[in-house]
Amino acid sequence: MKKIIALLLLLFIFTNSAFCSDAIIKWRHGLDEEGIETRIGERYPLPTQNVPFSYFIATQTIDVGTSTAVAIGTLATYTRSILVGAYDSQVNFGNSTIPAATYPFHIDAETYVEFDVATRTPALYFRGATASTSVYILEK
């Protein structure tokens, strides 16, 4: 009887793994207020698309110029992602040494991008590309 149960168990494992091979689950690791956590999904280090927008009610607004990069403020507890939009002119984003000139990582005027965040104080800086402007941040 034990051999039959073991055989059925092995048969079940092999048939399920053969039929479920298309389902790829990607785990991502994050950090919340309680410590390290594991979530299902993918983490993109940089956004890939500018999405048009007219306005949204921001939870933070940062005034940025072309002379220095300005860091993002502390986010609310358990924030998972943020929408960052620029309305007046193009804004570059990256680390503290981002240039004001042409830069591949930017947010165009009247568009926003979404960032996945893992901490309340991400190392994300903004700098105006052509003129001083405001950066609108909506925490999700």
Image (cartoon, rainbow, N blue to C red):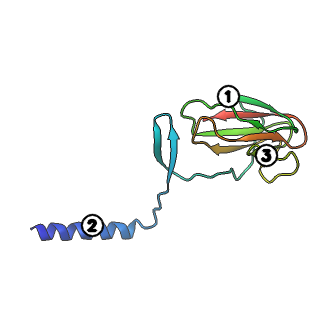
Up-down relation of residue 46 to residue 135 (above or below): below
* Residue at the image position 71 percent from the left and 39 percent from the top: 84
Point out the tag, 2 or 3, that comes first from the N-terminus.
2
Q: How many marks?
A: 3
Residue 78 versus residue 56: which sits nearer the camera? 78
**Residue 1 located left or right of residue 12:** left
> SS of the residue at dot 3?
loop
> SS of the residue at dot 2?
helix
Q: Which residue is mark 1?
A: 59
Q: CA distance from mark 2 to mark 3?
A: 55 Å
Q: Amino acid at mark 1?
A: Thr
Disc 2 packing (10 Å; few <14; some 14–19; many ≥20): few
Q: CA distance from mark 1 to mark 2?
A: 51 Å
Disc 1 packing (10 Å; few <14; some 14–19; many ≥20): some
Q: Which residue is mark 3?
A: 97
Q: Amino acid at mark 2?
A: Phe
Q: Is residue 110 visible?
A: no
Residue 13 rendering spot, x and y as whole percentages? 29, 66
Q: Nearer the viewer, mark 1 or mark 3?
A: 3
* Residue at the image position 47 percent from the left and 61 percent from the top: 24
Quarter residue 3 falls in: bottom left
Q: Which residue is mark 2?
A: 12
